[in-house]
Amino acid sequence: MNAMKFSTRSTPLRRLPLRPLLTPLLAALLLAGCAAVGPDYHGAPDAAPKASQAQAFVRQPDAGVGRASAPAQWWRTLDDAQLNALIDAALAHNPDVHAAQARMRQSRAQLRQQQANEMPTSSATVAALRTNTPESSFTNSGPMTLYTADFDASWELDLFGGKRRAVEAASAQAEAVDADLADTQVSLAAEVAQAYVGLRDQQQRLRLAQSSAQLQQRMLDLTEQRRAAGTAADVDVERLTTQVQTTRATLVPLDEQISESLDRLAVLTGREPGELDQTLAPVGNLPTLPATVEVGDPATLLRRRPDIRAAERRLASANAEIGEHTADLFPKVSLFGTLGFSADEPGHLLRKSNFSWVGVPYLQWNVLDFGRTRGAIHAAEAARDEAEAKYAHTVLQALQDANGALSRYGHQREHLDRLRQVQVSAQRAADLTRQRYRAGTTTLIDLLDTQRTEFAAQQDVVAGEAELLDDFVSLQKSLGLGWQERGASGQPPMTNGRDSG
């Protein structure tokens, strides 16, 4: 059989009429540079106008608090090397941080995907077609082979800014997720510090209880010797025995709490329970508070807190989505083109005579959608209003957190001063009573009462110091401190692009 001859006639490249194509293309490009439809974003509303202008917080105490800018790594002001190492390890290895970093990478990948949607799409195809046609008067019968090589490209012109609004929304959403990572770091640093303070508090109270039990046991031994000599009564021995057993009973729950704190710190730093026992089991002192805690002003807080930045960026994203849906009301103009070669012999494929091309501008307009687009726009507007309300709530909640933390910190400082005064008085009373007891001028009951008071005062001071440290940590968290300047893979955080473009 004779192979069917197949040729494609086309205009040579040098003779292509480009002017009719370039004119509408340039006009479309000019239109694409116009402003996008939908509301432009001009920033979040001022949800707390008084606070943003205030020089100090409403509940800021008069003493122990400064107005200078607070350090981001606030835990280093506590002068505790082990605490510094624990927080650094947690920020590097905690699974919650890794999950937040993964969400950040995901949001940035989605942003790049939206940015790519603004560009043309293209594809290349190479094919060898083998067919058999029936015999007719117009064609030769028998099998036929056709070789083709095509390159196709299409581009939807963003005349009304729908794609630009989509990129704007994705960019703001990526920045919100970036702020979420910072918020995770803030919470994690505070949680590690509070767990560490709790551990040192429990160890200190255990040490005090052990020392008290040893002292009481010595008193019991001496009283038993006096009873044997006939100078002490059985009731004195029983009272001391009861006090010794009561004090020793407090050791068991403290041991349990210490084990829980060690395991909690291990998990927070990305380790298995028990891995920090050797490092942290030795009794350590509570971290040392700085003489003055710097807190800045409310305006700095509103700029610094990651949850506020995340809420503001989500508001910007919701605002951009209105324009993205509004663009669906207008026609879409696309350009389609294909370049190709076709021949019945592989060696003839790239001949100029076998070249063909097609260029097609086309318009698509969903004229009758029965309100679907309008419904999407109204839903986006409602979502924007919701995001704005959430932003205002986040701002007010942040101010409440900061003022509440400042109030607790200031009152706890005063409370601790009173507890220390009580401790000094209790120690003096105990010393005097012991001297009188040795001289035989007071009873054992009086001595036991003063010892219980002294021990309780010591416990109260340690608990008060730990509570003040816990309030200090809560204050730093409420100020939005503890997040790192650089994101995952060492990349700096994304810039806040509030303008719609």
Image (cartoon, helix red, strand yellow):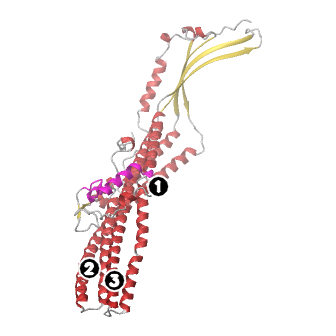
Query: Could you tell me if residue 121 is visible in this image?
Result: yes
Q: Which mark's residue is nearer the viewer, 1 or 2? A: 2
Query: At 44% from the left edge and 49% from the top edge, which residue is drawn?
Result: 100
First of labels 1, 2 by sequence position: 1
Tag of residue 422: 2
Q: What secondary structure is marked by label 3?
A: helix
Q: What secondary structure is marked by label 1?
A: helix
What range of the chain is rendered magenta? Answer: 69-96
Q: Position of residue 224 (x, y in %)?
A: 35, 87
Which image quarter is the C terminus in?
top left
Q: Name the residue under label 1.
A: 386
Dividing the picture into quarters, in which one does residue 246 lie?
bottom left
Q: Position of residue 315 (x, y in %)?
A: 42, 50
Query: At 75% from the left edge and 10% from the top edge, which residue is drawn?
Result: 141
In the rendered structure, the answer to whether residue 204 lies left or right of residue 144 reads left
Number of marks in the image? 3
**Is 15 placed above or below 163 here?**
above
Q: Mark 3 points at which residue?
A: 221
- Quick one: which residue is furthest to the top in this view? 2
**Is 256 placed above or below 495 here?**
below
Pick the residue in front: 193 or 405: 193
First of labels 1, 3 by sequence position: 3
CB within 8 Å, label 1 to label 2: no
Q: How crowded is mark 1: few (under 14 residues within 10 Å), some or many (20 or more)?
A: some
Q: What secondary structure is marked by label 2?
A: helix
In the rendered structure, the answer to whether residue 76 lies left or right of residue 327 reads left
**Is 403 placed above or below 35 here?**
below
Pick the residue in front: 483 or 176: 483
Q: Distance between the residues labelled 1 and 2?
A: 53 Å
Q: Which mark's residue is nearer the viewer, 1 or 3? A: 3
Tag of residue 54: none
